[in-house]
Image (cartoon, helix red, strand yellow):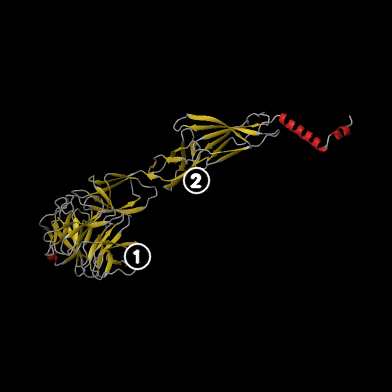
Amino acid sequence: MDIKKVIGFFSFWQLLRIVALAVILFAIWSPIRELMAIKKSVVFFCGNSATLTWDPPSEGIVDHYIVKMVTTKPLKGSENYVSWANYISVSTNKFTWSPADGYNYSFRVRAVGPNGEMSDYSEDELLVICDCTAPEVNVNALVVNRGGTGSDGMTLKGVYDDSNIAYVELNNKKANLDLLNQHWQVGLGTSISDSEYVLSAYDYAGNTATKKIEILNEPIDIDSNPSGGKLYLMGSPEYPGRYFTNLPYKLPVRLKTSWSIPVTIKLAGMMTATEMVSFPVQGDQILFELKPFKRPSDFAIEEISTIDIGSEPDLFVVNFDNDLPLEILACSKDGVSIIDSGLVLKLDLRDVKGEPFDMSQGCEAFVIDYDDDLRYELVLSQSDGKGLALFELKDQLWEQSGVIGLEGVTVGCGPVKFAFQDWNNDDNKDLIVADCDGALNVFLNIGSDLAPSFGGVSQKILLAGRAKNAPFVFFDWDGDGDVDILSLDENGNIDEWENLGGWDFSDSPTVIVAPSVWGLEVYSFKCGDFNSDGLPDLVLSTREGGLFVAWGGE
């Protein structure tokens, strides 16, 4: 055949159409080869939208694709699940859907040609696990023996809750995983220097969980002898402090613990004890030996300082290290000083403007952990009589941080006499203030022990025979568990007004001691068992600034 004649029989455009038709027919009838296998068979994912893509067939023309998507929802708490299949037609080699947290999705894809012929489904199946929930991880209760961890060291164990967990680590050290039981464990060695650890868990979807944990010593057994005392923190001989717990008590202690705190133990019939407790302790027990309460039948007077601290000094006893001589805070027109072993440390007090605090009219002082931050604050009466000034220690300076108002109380007859006491037995500090008429005014704490807020005067106490503007002290003088009031009578004697229960006081006082027999005119005094012999003692100041202690004796 003459090829030139054949070609010449058709025009150029006719030839082009014939060639194109042949190519199309070949493509239609040519089989579509199987899609390329999905390279990664399992994917962990967390997000609102996901797109699946794949390579087109190596030969043939594709009209569309069919995506087989099997959705599976595991049932929590069991090995059961529910699943269903959807077949989705897409025109391109990608498919976008919105995954739901906690669901698994598996995919296989097939291609469909223009004439309806189909490839087989892809050999590999892609599994997409949608996980947007952080793993839960916890440590089992663990106690380190105080005597050591043994030759094999210590292993910390715990549990986790996440079927897609990747790894767990403690302070960047990976733990061994028991995937079947969802347990983890990590060795800490034989020498443990830290008590705080960071425990972290990671799953394959990128979710993480982190928590700080503490490794504790065996609990320390704390009790009083006799047992059953009440334990208070940050107290003083004048105020027990913040109620903590009834004894006996097991106190968990961190491995690296080095701190000290004053504690007070009260028990009816026993002398209240105030001691300093320091950690770490030797052994596994703290036992507070309480002495039976005894009223003194006599006092032995002793001058404890000849240092000039100014006239008319108010006193507050600080004796947390249980040594002698006593540490005494003295507050007068000349300022506030701490006297210890014959040495005097004068405190630098600044008002809210940063100026030296005005004590030109004298002052009354009280040391207390006012806001339960385990640090002592200093409360002083103000010269203008309008309230009590609150001070906090900052870089060797006592800076005024607030004022406690005294609305409803007649003041202005000298430094305001006041004290703190838990008046209504709610474990919150209340405020008692003496007015110029001789009454004691009770301000109940309507806030909390952490953030005190004192309302108006809720009760007035009139003590028959008490001298106006005299100092007063709360002390359980008869050891019956009820706090009594000690104050000066009009003759200058130190008297007891017995608490008959419910803050109902005796009509007439009992004279404890007449300082005039020692030739003293008492200006201020405090009471406590300062030498731990079970007998109350008195610390006294005179108007001229003399300091004395009257040791209670039998």
The quarter of the displayed image where residue 440 is located = bottom left
In the rendered image, which residue does mark 2 sit on?
172
420 or 61, nearer to the observer: 61
Q: Nearer the viewer, residue 58 or 361?
A: 58
Seen in the picture, residue 28 relative to 224 is either above or below; the reply is: above
- Check the image and name the residue furthest to the right: 2
Q: Residues within 10 Å of mark 1 (few under 14, many from 20)?
A: few
Q: Residues within 10 Å of mark 2 (few under 14, many from 20)?
A: few
Give the SS element for disc 2: loop
Tell me if 17 is positioned left or right of 274 in this view.
Answer: right
Q: Is residue 256 left or right of residue 500?
A: right
- Helix, strand or loop at mark 1: strand
Residue 161 image offset from top left, x and y in percent: 45, 37
Q: Residue furthest left?
A: 508
In this image, 400 relative to 68: left or right? left
**Can the viewer see residue 151?**
no
Do residues under tags 1 and 2 come within 8 Å of each other at their CB atoms? no
Label 1 and label 2: CA atoms lie apart by 43 Å
* Picture layout, residue 302 above or below residue 67: below
What amino acid type is highlighted by mark number 1?
A: Leu
Identify the amino acid type marked 2: Asn
Determine the image quadrant of residue 2: top right
- 1 or 2: tag closer to the N-terminus: 2
Disc 1 target residue: 397
The answer to which of 321 and 510 lies nearer the viewer is 510
Residue 478, image x, y percentages? 15, 52
Quadrant where the N terminus is found in the figure: top right
In terms of image quadrants, where is residue 31?
Answer: top right
